[in-house]
Image (cartoon, helix red, strand yellow):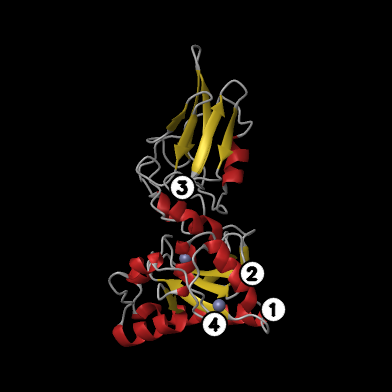
Amino acid sequence: MRGGERRREPMTARDLSSSLRGRPARLQLPACPASHAPASDEGTERVTGFSSWGGAGVRSAIMQVCWLVRKDKCCQRIKLPHLKTVVIGRGPETEITDKKCSRQQVQLKADCNKGYVKIKQEHLGHWSQGLKISMQDPKMQVYKDERVVVIKDKYPKARYHWLILPWDSISSLKSVTKEHLELLEHMHAVGEKLIQQCLDKDSLEFRLGYHAVPSMSQVHLHVISQDFDSPCLKNKKHWNSFTTEYFLNSQDVIEMVETKGKVLVKDGTSELLKLPLRCHVCKQHQSTIPQLKEHLKKHWPK
Ligand SMILES: [Zn+2]
Ligand SMILES: [Zn+2]
């Protein structure tokens, strides 16, 4: 008989690692249950989606093998060969379908002799999934409420550069509809609040907006100060993505959704990234990034 299903808090990779670590190697595999609840049943899963997994090691006379076994079924145990790195995540193998879990969510390396499994989660997943990972990381969160979370841009292009992301998965502006109007307005309001709370709000200008053709896979509102004083601003693409029409004002996006029901991005918008460098304040042309950076100092607050 299997014990009653205990409702658990979502497990993090660290929890998973500690539950695997030091586990004796004579674990029994659970019996295969009649019903196969999908992994996504765990509605509260956030980052890893592995809350329903545990570890089991099985010793054999010839060689030692470790298996990762789902607590509620035995059909899809995953073999963890001795000292070989196994990468798992969302996919048919785990039956995890939650998009917040990347296809390469965790690296597992079992040491069958010592009886533990090492877990590594950093630097995994497709880079475009990075935001989804960052937004779930409490260390990155500057503000959160029931609808949105704010993080600092990992590679700020100015003295202040925040990203506001909805908890709901919205892959890009393309999938935004009238249903999202309130959310967009809320995101804007949160952005305004951040600016109000900024110590340099009186000396710096700010813009709130979206990249017309974003590279990251979750809609995010940029709140960025207009000094563009940052070592992370390195190339023409960076510059033009914030200073040409490639950067859509939050207010304009909201209006467009109100009137047209969606966000229309003009053909050739990506080409704007190749435009020659031009100062966003005085419109003067600059031939190189270092030259532009030097020029920008003129516009900084005294
Ligand atoms: Zn962006
Ligand atoms: Zn200028």
Pointer 1 and pointer 3: residues touching (CB < 8 Å)?
A: no
Q: Amino acid at mark 1?
A: Asp
Q: Are marks 2 and 4 in contact (CB under 8 Å)?
A: no
The image quarter in which residue 33 lies: top left
Q: Is mark 1 within 8 Å of ligand 2?
A: no
Q: Which mark is residue 164?
A: none
At which x and y percent is residue 88?
45, 40
Q: Which residue is mark 3?
A: 125
Q: Nearer the viewer, residue 258 or 127?
A: 127
Q: Is residue 125 above or below residue 291?
A: above
Residue 165 location, x and y as percent?
50, 68
Judged by depth in the image, the label closer to the viewer, 2 or 4, is 2
Spatial CA span between label 4 and label 3:
31 Å
Give the distance between the C-alpha atoms of the residues marked 3 and 2, in whole angstroms: 28 Å
Q: Residue at x 41, y 46 (%)?
A: 103
Above or below, 203 relative to 162: below
